[in-house]
Amino acid sequence: MSLFDKTEEHSSLIAQEYEIAGKKIICQTCGNDAFHYRDALLDTAMASFFGMEWANKRAAILICAKCGKIEWYLEKPDVA
């Protein structure tokens, strides 16, 4: 599975505004508020050794639509 697999819940083609805990997410580098969403698998050595990568946790990735900075989140952000 690729780091940048598409998901059905969020459109990865359209930059969107997101929030977590009711607070809008702003890029810390450029101040932009539009991001592309990706879903990622948090791989562990033990799961990989036994061929059980599917059992690992997932993370949400937001990629700034302006500067490309990548931010990782353990919980899926809400679309603002």
Image: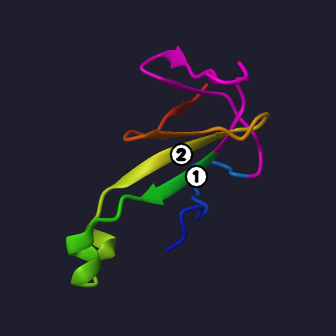
Which residue appears at 64% of the width and 25% of the height? 27
Residue 60, how many percent across, how many down? 48, 46
Q: Of the residues shown, which amino acid type is indicated by label 1? A: Arg
Amino acid type shown at disc 2: Ile
Report x, y in % for residue 20.
Answer: 47, 25
* Extreme-top residue of the structure: 23
Residue position marked by numbered label 1 in the rendering = 38
Q: Which residues are magenta?
A: 13-36
Q: Is label 2 in a helix, a strand or a loop? A: strand
Q: Principal SS element in the magenta part?
A: loop
Please give left or right for residue 62 compared with residue 67 in the image: left
Circle 2 sits on which residue? 61
Q: Quadrant of the C terminus?
A: top right
Task: Report, in whole angstroms, how far the alpha carbon at label 2 lies from the one at label 1.
Answer: 5 Å
Looking at this view, is 9 or 33 the one in front? 33
Looking at marks 2 and 1 on the same chain, the residue that comes earlier in the sequence is marked by 1
